[in-house]
Image (spheres, grey):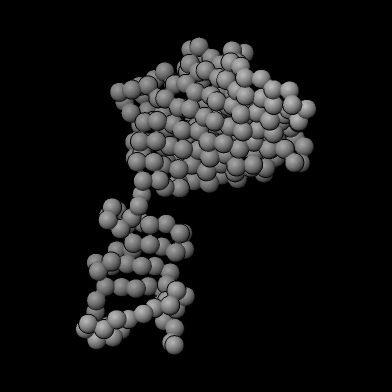
């Protein structure tokens, strides 16, 4: 069996067409016998780009763009991770996924929003927090955390309790930001984070609230209360 390899599959061109089989024939292609970098439609528009692993066609019949990875930020001794580009009215929901976040000093992850592209992070927000805790010694609790929520506050908001700086401790989770590009509504958000924290403690934290502004929110900042982000990844997705 022959193998066909190509950088690009393009639209019909009578001067250089390759015909596989005659009309009515069945052509069988093995799973690994065609290798291409891009797949294009009959108009020469790229539908799938294998170099990025994404559908890039604007045509909904070809491209599933309901959820799209927009940005990946990797921490390596970073004091903060900021997303200053790509947050607008393009998507109805922006999702931030936290993967293996670890501080260099035991602390919690905090965040705030901005409506001036990241020049200031001081939006007014009202928030609520509750979490479930359990230790390796089987001492657990479920409680509201009025000590870390805000009522018309402008401070950085904690998203999870303290995570130890030990090499095998980390925090992971996700945050949803709704309609940040709206000029009509306040900006709702919620977050769920899971942390292996101080005193060998498992914490499942639920935090939610809203930015009290009808101006577009166009930047988000994540940081620890002190120290730096030793390791970890934050991915930002757009959801239509």
Q: Quadrant of the N terminus?
A: bottom left
In this image, 159 relative to 15: left or right?
right
State the image coordinates of residue 188 (x, y, percent, origin top left): 42, 25
Q: Residue at x 55, y 25 (%)?
A: 206
The quadrant in which residue 103 appears is top right
In this image, 123 relative to 44: left or right?
right
Frontmost residue, 113 versus 136: 136
In this image, 189 relative to 59: left or right?
right
- Give the answer, above or below, for where 110 lies relative to 234: above
The quadrant in which residue 16 appears is bottom left
State the image coordinates of residue 50 (x, y, percent, origin top left): 44, 64
In this orientation, does residue 163 appear? no
State the image coordinates of residue 4 (x, y, percent, origin top left): 41, 81
Q: Residue at x 26, y 83 (%)?
A: 25
The quadrant in which residue 3 appears is bottom left
Q: Residue furthest front?
A: 138
State the image coordinates of residue 196 (x, y, percent, origin top left): 69, 33
In this orientation, does residue 87 appear? yes
Q: Residue at x 49, y 46 (%)?
A: 71
Q: Residue at x 22, y 82 (%)?
A: 24
In this image, 118 relative to 146: left or right?
left
Q: Quadrant of the C terminus?
A: top left
Q: How many marks?
A: 0
Frontmost residue, 63 versus 24: 24
Frontmost residue, 201 versus 225: 201
- Give the answer, above or below, for where 203 lies relative to 86: above
């Amino acid at each position: 069996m022959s193998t066909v390899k190509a950088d690009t599959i393009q639209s019909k061109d009578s001067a250089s067409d390759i015909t596989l089989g005659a009309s009515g024939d069945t052509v069988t292609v093995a799973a690994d016998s065609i290798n291409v970098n891009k797949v294009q439609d009959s108009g020469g528009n790229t539908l799938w780009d294998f170099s990025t692993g994404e559908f890039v066609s604007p045509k909904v019949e070809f491209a599933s763009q309901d959820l799209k990875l927009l940005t990946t930020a990797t921490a390596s001794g970073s004091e903060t991770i900021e997303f200053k580009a790509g947050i607008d009215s393009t998507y109805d929901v922006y999702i931030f996924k936290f993967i293996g976040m670890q501080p260099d000093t035991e602390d919690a992850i905090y965040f705030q929003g901005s409506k001036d592209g990241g020049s200031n992070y001081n939006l007014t927000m009202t928030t609520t927090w509750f979490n479930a805790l359990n230790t390796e010694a089987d001492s657990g609790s479920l409680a509201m955390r009025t000590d870390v929520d805000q009522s018309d506050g402008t401070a950085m908001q904690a998203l999870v309790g303290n995570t130890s700086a030990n090499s095998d401790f980390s925090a992971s989770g996700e945050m949803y930001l709704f309609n940040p590009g709206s000029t009509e509504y306040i900006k709702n958000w919620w977050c769920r984070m899971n942390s292996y924290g101080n005193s060998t403690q498992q914490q499942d934290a639920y935090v939610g609230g809203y930015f009290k502004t009808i101006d577009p929110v166009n930047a988000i900042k994540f940081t620890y209360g002190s120290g730096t982000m030793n390791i970890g990844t934050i991915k930002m997705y757009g959801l239509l």
